Amino acid sequence: LPLRTLDHRRIRLYQGFWIPEDYLRGVLTIQEHFTSRPTDLFVTSYPKSGTTWLKALIFATMTRKKYPLDQNPLLAYNPHQCIAYIDKHFSHGRSRIVEAIPSPRVLSTHIPYSILPESITGSDCRIIYIWRDPKDVIVSLWHFAQEVYEGTPDLPSFSESFELFCEGNSYFGPIWNHIIEYWQESKRKPEEVLFLKYEDMLEDPIKYARILANFIGCPYSEAEEKQGAIEQVVDLCSFKKLKDLEVNKCGSGTILDGHVSYAAFFRKGMVGDWRNHMTSEMAQRLDGIVAEKFKEAGLEMINMK
Ligand code: A3P
């Protein structure tokens, strides 16, 4: 039976994960019919873990030689317009859009690793996964739902949403299993799955922009390093730069089942905003749940500031 989650959206349990009901058809179609190409690169994440930033960094890295810095499409388009979100396209019956993208494709999905089609997991496609402190994820998710579903009666309060999240009941949740599955694959196939953490990236974006460039096969040459190309990419994708762009202040798109203003993807962009929303008991409870699951899987909870 469907459950209600952080907003009016309903979720259904499918193969151990709660999938938004309106995306279930898309997820099933992807599972059955998605055809990967060996050159495909997937941006994967649990929602609100830094996907927009990762998309921007990958897009800017790959296109840095194609466009002069002041003409990069990221200055005029939201990162979600630059990299296709397959869950949405397949759910809306628009798989052709994805099929029409020329190789090498960069595509994104929130689908848990174990639900991805064999065409992806059994191939040489590369996957980049970003995860984030679940305490900040639930805060970000709650604000996003408030914004997107503004005006919907009876939206759950933060503490109600927090309860659901701790029970694993949120889009593509439980979050701990989502993270663990991609982590396990990154250990098994490090050349194919890159496992990144939002907080680490914020602390040293240059280091991670370099790691990303190497992983996707567009490393910075010595000359580029000297010219500061890597700093330029990081700067172009910085929270402040993207947030202040006209497209991201005033634009909107159909990210979920309705219209979403792009501004909703740029809220605070910081580590630790959970402190403004949770009591220390709540924080300890969620940390405890996640730590136990991570420990069972052999993944230590690192860098939880
Ligand atoms: P907050 O709501 O905590 O501010 P996603 O892109 O997966 O939907 O995640 C959204 C979160 O990433 C939001 O977190 C958003 O502010 C943050 N974010 C968006 N762009 C960013 C950037 N360029 N740098 C750092 N964080 C960014």
Image: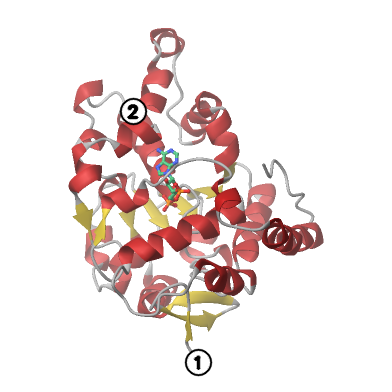
Contact flag, marks 2 and 1 (Cβ < 8 Å): no
Tell me: 162 left or right of 232: right
The secondary structure type at the circle numbered 1 is loop
- Residue 1's label in the rendered image is 1
Earlier residue among tags 2 and 1? 1
Towards the viewer: 173 or 160: 160
Cα gap from disc 2 to disc 1, whole angstroms: 44 Å
Total marks in image: 2
Task: Name the foreground residue: 111 vs 261.
Answer: 261
Q: Quadrant of residue 88?
A: bottom left
Looking at the rendering, in which quadrant would you find the C terminus? top right
Question: Which is more toward the observer, 86 or 238?
Answer: 238
**Which residue is farthest bottom?**
1
Rendering coords of residue 102 (x, y %): 25, 48
Residue 22 placement (x, y as % from top left)? 35, 78
Question: Residue 208 placed where, x, y %?
Answer: 53, 30
Residue 54's place in the image compared with 134, above or below, is above
Instruction: Please give the name of the residue rendered at 39% of the width and 80% of the height, measured from the top-left corner.
Output: 154
User: Does ligand 1 reach within 8 Å of label 1's beta carbon?
Assistant: no
Q: Residues within 10 Å of mark 1 (few under 14, many from 20)?
A: few
Residue 35 seen: no
- Residue 106 versus residue 96 in the image, above or below: above
- Taking the spot 31% from the left edge, 26% from the top edge, the residue there is 64
Q: Is residue 289 left or right of residue 274?
A: right
Q: Secondary structure at mark 2?
A: helix
Amino acid type of the residue tagged 1 in the rendering: Leu
Which residue is tagged 2? 236
Task: Tell me where residue 60 sits by quadrant.
Answer: top left
Q: Amino acid at mark 2?
A: Leu
